[in-house]
Amino acid sequence: MNSAGLIQSETSEGILTLRINRPDKKNALNLAMYQSLADGLRQADSDDKIRVILIRGGDECFTSGNDLADFLSSPPTGPESPVMQFLDAISEARKPVVAAVNGLAVGVGVTMLLHCDLAYAGTTASFQMPFVNLGLCPEAGSTLLLPRIMGHQRAAELLLLGEPFNAEKAHSLGIITEICQDADVLTTARNKARQLAAQPAAALRLAKELLKRDYAAPLRETIAEEGRQFVARLKSPEAAEALQAFMQRRKPDFSKFS
Ligand code: COA
């Protein structure tokens, strides 16, 4: 599996930057891209020269989420699938993870931010978690993390209605650390990553582990259970209708399903 430049990886000043780079598909993540991200995160954890991981997209798009064509042609089947490996790797990363978000962040483009330690987004960034809209279910531990961060009703609004929301709302709900001018997002994220890279590495890892101590185990279980349900939902008539509708550029019609 080769992501052939769709995930660009570069290490400098102790920072591993993973850049999602598939602009013609709005940075949708295919299997090979998930695998490259998972491999990069795992390698970072075992390489002493890497102290921080920075995840970024392009200037206009962070990521439009999972490649919807892949959901039809090669859906995830279980824990070994690249998407599950990516979710395990990012949720269990021992070193700090920083995100730089410009433009669209959809689906896993939002839920991965919940596993980042710092996330910076531009004023015009737009966020959406349309899992239910696609006949699927939330993933990446979001059913545990979102209510924990913002309470049930706010989490329910984001997940059940699946509407887009702006950077101001993402910030007030606690999904991102700070809003920056669009042109400053990457510089800000890099500066914070440099600051983290200069911190004592062992103390940093310990602080991160302690921050997550009370929910690390239930988070692992939630990611696994959501993953099982997600795989099952991909075979549902509701998801089939939603995915076909996306491919055919029409509105889905769920009225015939109960
Ligand atoms: N999976 C696969 N292809 C995607 C994609 C995705 N998640 N998101 C965008 N693309 C593709 C489009 O099919 C289109 O391809 P084409 O030029 O070969 O037809 C191209 O990227 C540009 O997308 P387009 O829809 O024309 O751009 P837009 O600016 O009008 O809308 C989005 C952008 C992201 C709002 C819209 O593409 C969208 O809703 N994508 C699906 C997002 C989603 O549901 N993600 C999964 C969540 S679980």
Image (tube, grey):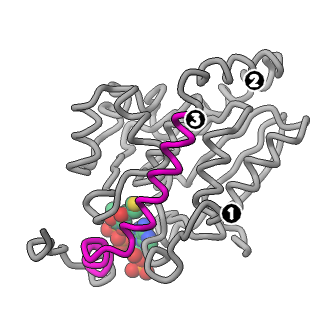
The part of the chain drawn in magenta is: 218-245
Label 3 Cα crowd, 10 Å radius (few <14 / some 14-19 / many 20+):
many
CB atoms at circles 1 and 3 under 8 Å apart? no
Residue at image mark 3: 116
Q: Name the residue under label 1.
A: 35
* Label 2 within 8 A of ligand 1 by Cβ: no
Q: Mark 2 points at which residue?
A: 205
For the point 80% across and 40% down, the residue is 45
* Rendered view: 132 above or below 53: below
Label 2 is placed on what type of residue?
A: Arg
Q: Which of marks 2 and 1 is nearer the N terminus?
A: 1
Q: Where is residue 11 in the image (x, y as percent from the top left)?
A: 82, 45
Dot 2, crowdedness within 10 Å: few (<14), some or many (≥20)? some
Magenta segment, prevailing SS (helix, strand or loop):
helix
Image quarter of the N terminus:
bottom right
Determine whether the residue tagged by mark 3 lies in a helix, strand or loop: loop
Q: Which amino acid does label 3 sit on?
A: Cys
| Image quadrant where residue 158 sits | top left
**Is residue 176 inside the magenta stretch?**
no
